Image (cartoon, rainbow, N blue to C red):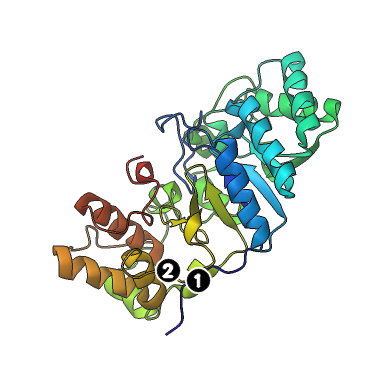
Amino acid sequence: MAEFNIRRLISGGLITNYFCTSRCRHCLYRCGPRWPKKYMNPETGEKSLRLIRKLGCRSVHIGGGEPMLRPDELGQILDAAARAGVHAAYVETNSSWFRDMASAQSVLSDLREKGLQTFLVSISPFHNEFVPFSKISGVMEACERTGISIFPWVADFIPDLSAFDPDTAHPLKDYEEKFGENYLLQILKRYWIHTGGRALDTFRTILPNKSPRQILAENRGGCAQELSDTSHFHIDLFGNYIPGLCSGLSISIDDLGKPLSEKEYPVLTTLFHSGIKGILALAQENFGYAPAREGYINKCDLCSEIRAFFVEQGFGGESELNPGAFYRF
């Protein structure tokens, strides 16, 4: 039987914090203002970055949450990246921190000296529910003035956001009233979104649902491919490695590079070998679990419900269902 062992990292990033000014409907990590106000310390950052480099990855992005809520601490992480010999490709921001051009330029100039070269600036109707477009425009202009490159994600939405008052936030219903009732569904065709985390709640009512029986029939094998994928990994401020795009699952960075123990990671190793069928059986046999709904978008939707159930029951290894706040917010 194949081992679950993360031996090599290809491309990924750091999550410096989960607290955020926004509670975006599509957020894979369920970030928001209710999370504890904790930020990655330089020691955890450098330890993670040195491990990332050791396992073959020499460039990372930095995201959250909103990393720019504490620019001084972000600067410390950029310093840690330099010490570890890992290139910080870009920092993600929702632009909520923008106040005025002078202060923005001052902050960005300081971070540029620390190694900040590119900002991924989030641009979407989901972000605009919390962040006025004028702040986004302000950050992009401040970047141009300070010599920081801009990675607009996604520039295709700029005309949509420009159709409204730039100085206020706009709920999604404003977009639906202006562009049509199916606007939310159309977003999926214009914007890459992984249906996990909070996106499951957002899109569950408009996407086709399948019964648990259908999902089991379509997914008979394990989830080894998804869990072993290191083409877009993340390590968070608590030292959790998040396998693939499976938010709410975690591996201690101390356990990377060696086979995972079935005793210490019963949920993850069951998913790896037996997939959704395996953890459903685990929940049924140990706790009498039954699916709470008739329909689910996909196996990830059902898996998320089962994992939340495990957290309620206090089941699972200490290092595999983290951070706990993911299952509360």
The local secondary structure at tag 1 comes to loop
Q: Amino acid at mark 2?
A: Leu
Q: Which residue is mark 2?
A: 260
Comparing 258 with 97, the one in front is 258
| Residue 234 horizontal/vertical position (percent) | 56, 52
Vertical position of residue 159 compared to residue 130: above or below: below
Which quadrant holds the N terminus? Answer: bottom left
Q: Is residue 31 left or right of residue 276?
A: right
Whether label 2 touches label 1, CB < 8 Å = yes
Disc 1 marks which residue?
5
Q: Is residue 318 visible?
A: yes
Residue 105 coordinates in the image, percent (x, y): 77, 21
Q: Looking at the rendering, in which quadrant would you find the C terminus?
A: top left
Question: Is 137 located above or below residue 255 in the figure?
Answer: above
Report the disc number at residue 215: none
User: Residue drawn 44% across and 43% down?
Assistant: 30
For numbered disc 2, what is the local secondary structure?
loop
Residue at position x 72%, y 22% in the image:
107
The residues bearing labels 2 and 1 have C-alpha atoms spaced at a distance of 6 Å
Residue at image point 60% right, 34% down: 67
Q: Is residue 122 visible?
A: no
